[in-house]
Image: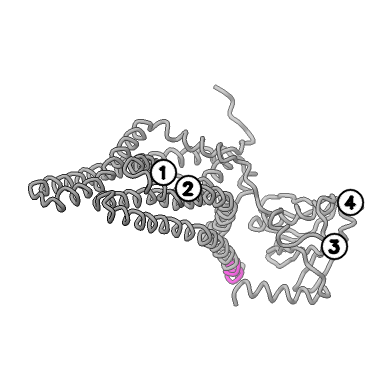
Amino acid sequence: MTDEKWTLNRMNSIKSLLNEEEIIHYVSSDIDENGNFGERWLILTRDEIIILNPIIKSIERVPLSEIRSAFVKDYIGNSELILETYSGFRSTIRFSREHLDSFYNMAKIIDKIAKKELNPENVDSRVLEELLVKKSNVKKTQALLWLISFLKPHIHYVILAVILSLSITALNLTPPYLMKILLDDVFAKRNISMLAYIVIAFISVYALNAGLGAAQNYTLSYLGQRIIYNMRVKIYEHLQVLSLAFYDRMTSGRVMTRVTDDVGRVQWFLTWGTQTLITSTLQIIGIGVIIFSMNLNLALFALLPIPIIVVGIPLFRKRSHKVYHKAWRRWADVSSLLWDTIPGIIVVKTFTQEKFELKRLIERMSNLVKANLKITLLHIKFFPLLGFSISTGTAIVWWIGGHEVLEEQITFGSLIAFVSYMGMFYGPIQTISNLFEPLQSSLTSSERILEIMQVEPDIKDAPD
């Protein structure tokens, strides 16, 4: 039985105990009040808080009208959710660190209801999702400036990489022009002597492009390795000075995810991502100048898809930020569980909790799959429309340009060169569009890393 089916069956049995009361939100714990492995549930309905032990079918109820506030109290190794009622403080359920986020969210909901900031009658899945989305305190500009700071010590390699990118971009603009000469001046005029020069020019361009590409790859790889080295050392150094309270709040698995996975994504952004973005932007500018100088009429038709791109990309970025953050939190949940469970497998086996841990993994993997599918759906809504608009623009250029060739307003070689440049024009645009996913992922990862780097140690070293 999958964990989702198990949870559904368990909730059905719990609802039967609660006389089918409408449940707003619920969380489950994996330990009892004595700190032993056990199952406990905290359930929020429209009128009350229910504390449930499904094993012995014990039910405690606390009316929402009696609650003044709710908060989580941390201990070493576990925590508990406490309700402040008009008659005093009341402990509800203890839970392990793995469930900390879930119970913090539950406390947040209860607290807002108690303080009349949230009406339980109006709470639905949409309201809960908006309420529980964890917003990062790190701004995008902060994260970006922090990333750029790692480039400063290697500025000479950055300059070299930019020069190589400019050179490669210029070389990539040459073949369509050579193709125009080949069609109009060699084939059309049967100029055999010029054929050898054009072929040699093609070979020279491709050879030089290959050499510069190899140099660029090595430069970017070296730059990426130095950056990731400095970043991981700096993060590790910072983690060493943080107090035990920090590690009690954040599991080792979540910390490891930031040091390994997130740093790797940031490395890609600082090297390959930024270089690809720069190269693609330069290509768009260079090709734009070329196609307008070749044929103003065709160039205007070639730009028909631009409004869709200009409007669509900001909308995509706005929606993607939220879903990417959610997906990375789900991946952190999975990674955290693996990092915490596998090193502690002796404890798991001692308490015969193998099936329990498997259920937890299946649940988190299911949540990860759902989050990634939301990303896929977002892409399906945007990128096919973008591709169709570009293809439509190309077809229109073939139609208009074909008539101009037949009417001898332009040469066949000019049309082929123009269409080639047009393909090269929208190629970088599609590249930049495809970059939004990894770039957004990298920025999200940088925000997650910077969240840790901004944590201040409880005890600071005295200044020298």
* Amino acid type at mark 2: Leu
Would you say the magenta stretch is mainly helix, strand or loop?
A: helix
Marked residue nearer the N-terminal end (4 or 3): 3
Q: Which mark is residue 107?
A: none
Circle 3/circle 1 CB separation < 8 Å? no
The residue labelled by disc 2 is 439
Circle 2/circle 3 CB separation < 8 Å? no
Q: Would residue 301 be found to the left or right of residue 167 on screen? A: right
- Which of 234 and 303 lies nearest the eye of the viewer? 303
Is residue 141 visible to us here? yes
The residue at the point 51 percent across, 47 percent down is 310
- How far, Cα to Cα, is label 4 from label 1? 59 Å
Magenta run includes residue 353: yes
* Amino acid type at mark 3: Glu
The residue labelled by disc 3 is 48
The residue labelled by disc 1 is 277
Give the magenta part as a residue range: 352-360
Which quarter of the picture shows residue 341?
Answer: bottom right
Q: Which residue lies furthest to the left in this view?
A: 193
**Crowd class of label 1 (few under 14; some 14 to 19; many from 20; radius 10 Å):** some
- Which of 139 and 334 lies nearest the eye of the viewer? 139
* Amino acid type at mark 4: Gly
